[in-house]
Image (cartoon, helix red, strand yellow):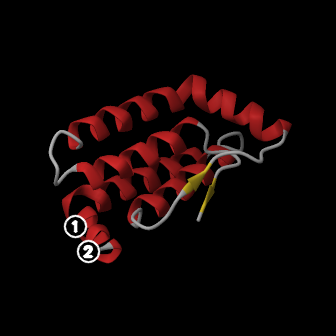
Amino acid sequence: MRFLGNIIWLLFGGIFSAIGWFVAGLLFCLTIIGIPFGVQCMKIAAFVLWPFGREVNVGKFGIGGFLLNVIWLIFFGWEIALSHFLIGLAFCVTIIGIPFGLQHFKLAKLGLAPFGASIS
């Protein structure tokens, strides 16, 4: 089921979302200050490519990770999390869309606090 879900995810928009995250990461990496944010965007892009069968664990970040998460949340994270949450709700309206909605809920969690998050 994981393999089939990931293939369907890729065909119906996952590849474009991953490319978008990757390009955002490259743009962040153009500045020295943006490099930590760019690395997190690359991490999210890799997760967006193959989300089924993987989990997001938020936590285990130090004071630096906490500060970067606060900056991320203020400038980028709340918009990203809200959009993934709303898309997830829209997918969960139908029975067929529920697995894809659950993946968007994982992305919303990752969009809130990417620093210190691990993907397993």
Q: Position of residue 49 (x, y in %)?
A: 39, 64
Of 35 and 117, the residue lying toward us: 117
Q: Is label 2 in a helix, a strand or a loop? A: helix
Q: Position of residue 39 (x, y in %)?
A: 62, 54
Are there few (<14), some (14-19), or many (20+) residues within 10 Å of tag 1? Answer: few
Q: Position of residue 91 (x, y in %)?
A: 22, 43
Of 33 and 37, the residue lying toward us: 37
Q: Is label 1 in a helix, a strand or a loop? A: helix
Query: Could you tell me the amino acid type at mark 2?
Result: Leu
Q: CA distance from mark 1 to mark 2?
A: 6 Å
The outermost residue toward the front is 95
The outermost residue toward the bottom is 3
Vertical side of 74 occupied by 50: above or below: below
Quadrant assignment, res 90:
top left
Quadrant assignment, res 64:
top right
Q: Residue at x 37, y 35 (%)?
A: 85
Are there few (<14), some (14-19), or many (20+) residues within 10 Å of tag 2? Answer: few
Which residue is denoted by mark 1 in the rendering?
8
Which residue is denoted by mark 2 in the rendering?
4
Q: Is residue 70 left or right of residue 119?
A: right
Q: Residue at x 15, y 45 (%)?
A: 94
Vertical side of 117 occupied by 77: above or below: above
On-image quarter of the C terminus: bottom right
On-image quarter of the N terminus: bottom left
Mark nearest the camera among 1 and 2 is 2
Q: Cβ–Cβ below 8 Å for labels 1 and 2? A: yes
Of 4 and 28, the residue lying toward us: 4
Query: Could you tell me the amino acid type at mark 1?
Result: Ile
The image's mark for residue 82 is none
Q: Position of residue 107 (x, y in %)?
A: 45, 46
